Image (cartoon, rainbow, N blue to C red):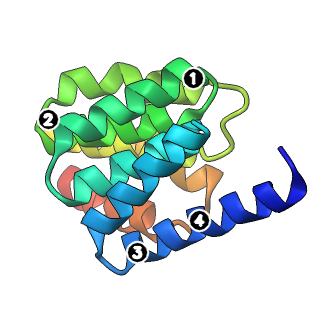
C-alpha cells in the first residue's frame, strides 16, 4: 500500500469511528462496509460488528466477529466481542467457550475483559464463586478497571 493511500485509508477509518461514536450508526455501517471491500481487517470487522450491536442487530454483529476470526484467529477482541453479543442474547453457555479462547490467546493483551465477561455470565447464572474468581482475576490484570471492582464488591455482598 502506498503511504498516501495508507494515510487516506486511516483517515476514512477515523471518520467512520467518529460517526459510530456520535451515534450515526447507519452512516458508520456503510463506511465500514466500504472500507472492508477495499481492505478487510479483523479490526474493521469488529468495528462493524459493534455498530450492528448498537443498532440492535446481534446476528450480524456475531457474524462480523466470525469473519474477523476467520481472517485472523489470533485477534482476541473478536472472541470477546462475539461472546458479549451472545450474552446480550442471553446465550450464556454459548458465550463461555469464546471467552475461554480469548483468554488462551498469547497475543491478546486485554485478557482482563474476557475474565470480566466470564464473571458477568457466572453472576447471571448464580455461580457466585466462579464469578468472584473471574472478577478478581480481571482486576488483578487491570487494577484500575472500575467495572471489575464494582462487580467484585457486589459479589462479596452476595457471599456474606
Residue at 63%, 50% (x, y): give it.
141
User: Which residue corresponds to mark 4?
Assistant: 12
Using a 10 Å C-alpha cutoff, classify the residue at mark 2 as few (fewer than 14 neighbours), some (14 to 19) or many (20 or more).
Answer: few
Look at discs 3 and 4 and give the one toward the viewer. Answer: 4
Q: Position of residue 118 (x, y in %)?
A: 36, 37
Seen in the picture, residue 113 relative to 87 is either above or below; the reply is below
Question: Which mark, by number, is residue 19?
Answer: 3
Which callout, 1 or 3, points at the residue further toward the start of the chain? 3
Using a 10 Å C-alpha cutoff, classify the residue at mark 3 as few (fewer than 14 neighbours), some (14 to 19) or many (20 or more).
Answer: some
Look at discs 2 and 4 and give the one toward the viewer. Answer: 4
Most extreme residue toward the right is: 3
User: Which residue corresponds to mark 2?
Assistant: 125
Q: Secondary structure at mark 2?
A: loop
Q: CA distance from mark 3 to mark 2?
A: 36 Å
Most extreme residue toward the bottom is: 22
| Residue closest to the eye, 81 or 137 | 81
Seen in the picture, residue 93 relative to 5 is either above or below; the reply is above
Which callout, 1 or 2, points at the residue further toward the start of the chain? 1
Q: Position of residue 14 (x, y in %)?
A: 58, 69
Amino acid at each position: 500500500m502506498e503511504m498516501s493511500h495508507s494515510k487516506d485509508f486511516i483517515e476514512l477509518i477515523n471518520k467512520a469511528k467518529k460517526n459510530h461514536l456520535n451515534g450515526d450508526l447507519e452512516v458508520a455501517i456503510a463506511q465500514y462496509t466500504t472500507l472492508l471491500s477495499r481492505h478487510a481487517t479483523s479490526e474493521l470487522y469488529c468495528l462493524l460488528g459493534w455498530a450492528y450491536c448498537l443498532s440492535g442487530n446481534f446476528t450480524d454483529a456475531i457474524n462480523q466477529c466470525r469473519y474477523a476470526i476467520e481472517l485472523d484467529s489470533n485477534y482476541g477482541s473478536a472472541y470477546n466481542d462475539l461472546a458479549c453479543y451472545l450474552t446480550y442474547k442471553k446465550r450464556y453457555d454459548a458465550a463461555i467457550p469464546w471467552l475461554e479462547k480469548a483468554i488462551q490467546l498469547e497475543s491478546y493483551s486485554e485478557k482482563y475483559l474476557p475474565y470480566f465477561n466470564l464473571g458477568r455470565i457466572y453472576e447471571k447464572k448464580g455461580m457466585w464463586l466462579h464469578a468472584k474468581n473471574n472478577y478478581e482475576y480481571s482486576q488483578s490484570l487491570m487494577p484500575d478497571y472500575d467495572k471489575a471492582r464494582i462487580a467484585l464488591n457486589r459479589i462479596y455482598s452476595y457471599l456474606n
